[in-house]
Amino acid sequence: AQTVTQSQPEMSVQEAETVTLSCTYDTSESNYYLFWYKQPPSRQMILVIRQEAYKQQNATENRFSVNFQKAAKSFSLKISDSQLGDTAMYFCAFRGNTDKLIFGTGTRLQVFP
Amino acid sequence: NAGVTQTPKFQVLKTGQSMTLQCAQDMNHNSMYWYRQDPGMGLRLIYYSASEGTTDKGEVPNGYNVSRLNKREFSLRLESAAPSQTSVYFCASSTSTGEYQPQHFGDGTRLSIL
């Protein structure tokens, strides 16, 4: 069975600095998708970034980028130029060959002024 | 564009009461899902429906039933609520045809069972 592990329950960063959130996963499948979702205090689940396993290039969305290491089964999220509005829970998620998402337990990120 | 709409947003029940959580999407998505979110546990899949007329169990289906009423609507029912079902419930939808698209989530229902 697939598993997703986020080993950092909480992280903090100063505004304008860079922070990296870690995620590892376990699967025997070769084709899959990985996602980072953001959940602010409003409780909405917002897709931040996605990565297809068959793509070697790391995905980037403005200030958000990933470091996808397929052999190591690692999928970290880097947030550059952190903003106060980035304060939220961040969830890593995996989707294999079934139409289901497996979520990690989340990392609470606090951005300080 | 409303996306995924869940009702109600908040609800308090007594142990043993029944309740149906409603979910509707207007994106013409084939697949719909129900998750629960508990502190420190992330989101866990309760049930999902890959298409109208089909439903399948997820990771934590016990104590719940679902109905895929039509392509737009997917409801979650608690027949006899228990305190262990106190949680935040999320509905999501996605399309399973063509290139995979990520799931879109509703705003959640906070359910407390006393």
Image (cartoon, helix red, strand yellow):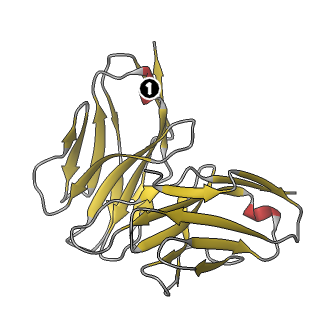
* Residue A63 image position (x, y, % from top left): 25, 30
Q: Is residue A13 above or below residue A104?
A: above
* Residue A86 image position (x, y, % from top left): 42, 29
Decide if residue A17 is on the left or right side of residue A90.
Answer: left
* Residue A113 image position (x, y, % from top left): 45, 12
Q: Is residue B91 above or below residue B39?
A: below
Residue flagged by tag 1: what amino acid is it?
Gly
Q: Which residue is mark 1?
A: A85
Decide if residue B102 is on the left or right side of residue B84.
Answer: left
The answer to which image quadrant residue B114 occupies is bottom right
Q: Is residue A62 above or below residue B60?
A: above
**Residue at the spot 60% in from the left edge and 57% down from the top edge:** B6
* Residue A35 image position (x, y, % from top left): 33, 53
Label 1: chain letter? A
Q: Is residue A72 above or below residue B15?
A: above
Residue B42, can we see it?
A: no
Decide if residue A57 is on the left or right side of residue B46.
Answer: left
Question: Which of the two residues, B22 or A46, is positioned nearer the viewer here?
Answer: B22
Residue density around tag 1, few if under 14, some if 14–19, many if 20 or more, within 10 Å: few
